Image (cartoon, helix red, strand yellow):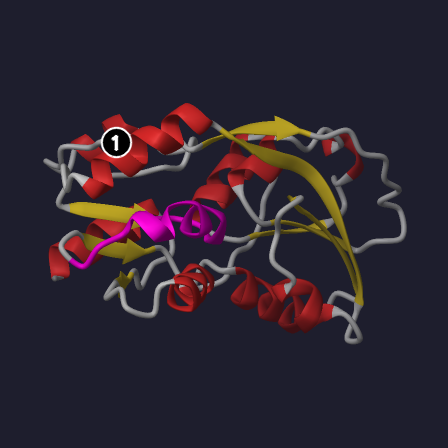
């Protein structure tokens, strides 16, 4: 069972997995104004941040960072090259930025983004965040997800962000296998439901979740 609106169920069904997809929120692009001139690099922490970015003409000579492979591939489809860390989370992205040698980066993120990147980068380089999208809960689908989980109608639930973890944590049970997409999501899960046992994907994307299921 997946909750992210950006998932492609057909892609997962190709692995022989029956997928229940209940998107818990819709993505809303936000208006923003920005001067990218003083920045050597730009960073994108999700596919949504790429989709809502509208200043591609201003990044032609910038170093572009992506949080992971799927975000990198979407940037490539826009005609730009990007680099991404070995592990697909904001902490490793921040460390990659530091290792790259750039002195200034602007990151495009969700309004509900965690402070992880800011905590790592502020004080080391010039760093600013622009929130170019937000997520709005779909209440009807949240009720549907609660029913499915409480009735144990699925065998596995994939938690693909800290925001999703916050929305469904109270519905989880150890009788359903829980898979976390990465360290930040795992940290949120552990803080909200220390009683829940879960596994964490080594590769922090949807393909990594599928691999994690195959290994367990």
Indicate left or right for 204 with 75 as reference.
left
Question: Nearest the camera: 119 or 136?
Answer: 136
Question: Nearest the camera: 19 or 171?
Answer: 171
The residue segment tinted magenta is: 159-174
Question: Nearest the camera: 42 or 215?
Answer: 215
Figure quadrant of the N terminus: top left
Residue 22 is at least partly visible in this image = no
Answer above or below: position of 180 versus 21.
Answer: below
Question: Nearest the camera: 7 or 113?
Answer: 113
Indicate the quadrant where residue 33 lies: top right
Residue 44 is at least partly visible in this image = yes
Answer above or below: position of 149 versus 5.
Answer: below
Residue 180 at x, y percent in the picture: 33, 57
Indicate left or right for 83 with 31 as reference.
left
Q: Which residue is mark 1?
A: 11
Indicate left or right for 29 with 182 as reference.
right
Q: What residue sits 38% from the left and 56% below the top?
A: 204
Residue 132 at x, y percent in the picture: 70, 37
């Amino acid at each position: 069972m997946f909750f992210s609106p950006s998932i492609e169920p057909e892609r997962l069904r190709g692995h022989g997995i029956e997928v229940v997809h209940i998107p818990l929120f819709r993505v809303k692009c936000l208006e923003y104004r920005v001067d990218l001139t003083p920045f050597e690099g730009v960073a994108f922490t999700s596919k949504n941040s790429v989709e809502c970015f509208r200043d591609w003409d201003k990044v032609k000579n910038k170093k572009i960072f992506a949080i992971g492979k799927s975000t990198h591939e979407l940037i490539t489809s826009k005609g730009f090259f990007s680099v991404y860390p070995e592990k697909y989370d904001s902490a490793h992205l921040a460390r990659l930025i530091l290792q790259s040698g750039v002195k200034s980066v602007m990151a495009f993120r969700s309004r509900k983004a965690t402070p992880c990147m800011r905590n790592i980068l502020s004080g080391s380089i010039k760093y600013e965040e622009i929130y170019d999208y937000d997520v709005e809960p779909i209440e009807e689908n949240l009720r549907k997800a609660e029913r499915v989980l409480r009735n144990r109608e699925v065998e596995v639930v994939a938690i693909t962000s800290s925001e999703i973890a916050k929305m469904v944590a109270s519905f989880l049970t150890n009788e359903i296998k829980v898979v976390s997409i990465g360290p930040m999501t795992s940290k949120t899960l552990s803080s909200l439901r220390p009683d829940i046992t879960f596994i964490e994907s080594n590769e922090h994307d949807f393909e990594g979740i599928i691999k994690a299921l195959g290994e367990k």
